Amino acid sequence: MDARKLNAIMTAIDLGSFSKAAESVGYTQSGLTHLVNSLEKELGFPIVHRDHMGITLTEEGKQLLPYIHAFLDANQQLQAKTEEIRKGAKQTIRIAAYASIAMKWMPEILYRFARICPNVEVSLRMVDDALQPFELLKEGKTDVIFASYHHASHCEWTPLYKEKMYAVIPESEDMKSDVYPIEKMQDQIFLMPYGRFDLDVHSIFNRYGISVKEKEMHVDDETLIRMVAKGMGVTIMSEMMIRGSHEGVKILPLYPQECRQIGAGVRLKEDEREPLIQLKKCVMDYVSSITHQSL
């Protein structure tokens, strides 16, 4: 039975007239009459009695009435639940990424992802603290993170990319090489990028026994580069941190070469939803495309 047609017929019965019901249900009077005739033919007995006073239910119709109401109520609940499921099907993936990764990688990755998962929304959160993505993941406030590797027992880690580390020095410094020996950092004024980047820098200095005059800087990366250009000290940055104007500075790969591991993390032992699987494929394809580019 057609719920819409039954609803129209019940409206006509409640109002006692096809003509009164026609306007409210969107049928013509003849159309409603045809619906009733069709239903009665399907049932095999009349449900409506017609006379000059209007329409009323026959005895058979009265017997069916509670079942018709139950059918219409169930159909309404079905439609409501269907709509609820449909709205819930609009999934969201929450991403937390270092600002440098968000700016360099995410526009292309999310463009590719949107083409294969157009119905999945993405919430991208940029963070500057090296450990914050791991904290957000642990607290269940994000679904996937893009960061440099730091041990976290709650995180399932996928290595993606070896990001080179560079020395940023004043242009006036006399250099006859296209690399910067790490030992030259010894005893220099070192402007430390903020956001716990010191974790990566200190691991390098500790490996080579380097001691510097460290100054912690609470400024963005572009401002830090300009401070180096003014001769206020030297610094180390990863390749994705180096943006904006390079005027007044030299940017040289460290020697021996140093890299930090960039990767993606999800909560340990959590079943991956299909959108996350598709996002991972987009990430791997993108990283593969840039791996052999000149850095």
Image: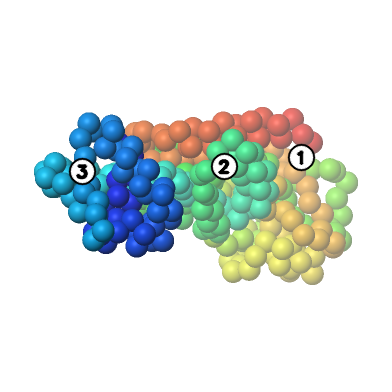
Calculate the distance from the C-alpha at mark 1 to the C-alpha at mark 2.
32 Å
User: In the shown orientation, is residue 4 left or right of residue 143?
Assistant: left
- For label 3, the crowd category at 10 Å Cα-Cα, with few meaning under 14, some 14 to 19 and many 20 or more, is many
The residue positioned 26% from the left and 37% from the top of the image is: 40
Say which of marks 3 and 2 sits in front: 3
Position in image of residue 213 (x %, y %): 62, 63
Q: Position of residue 295 (x, y in %)?
A: 76, 40
Gap between marks 1 and 3, in whole Å?
Answer: 81 Å
Q: CA distance from mark 3 to mark 2?
A: 49 Å
Is residue 250 left or right of 58 when viewed as pictured?
Answer: right
Residue at image point 48% right, 37% down: 275
Give the SS element for disc 1: loop
Amino acid type at mark 3: Ile
Q: Is residue 266 visible?
A: yes
Between circles 1 and 2, the one closer to the viewer is 2
- Residue 21 is situated, as x and y percent measured from the top left of the image, at 34, 59
Q: Check disc 2: other Cα within 10 Å, few if <14, some if 14-19, many if 20+.
A: few
Q: Which residue is mark 1?
A: 295
Image quadrant assignment for residue 221: bottom right
- Residue at 52%, 56% (x, y): give it: 125
Q: Are marks 1 and 3 in contact (CB under 8 Å)?
A: no
| Mark 1 and mark 2 residues within 8 Å of each other at the beta carbon | no
The residue that mark 2 highlights is 118
Looking at the image, residue 25 sits to the left or right of residue 105; the answer is: left
Q: Which secondary structure lies at badge 3?
A: loop
Q: Looking at the picture, does residue 222 appear above or below residue 104?
A: below
- Nearest the viewer among 254 and 90 is 90
Residue under label 3: 47
Instruction: Specify which label sits upstream in the sequence, 3 or 2.
Output: 3
Residue 185 visible, this angle: no
Which amino acid does the dot numbered 1 rest on? Leu
Q: Earlier in the sequence, mark 1 or mark 2?
A: 2
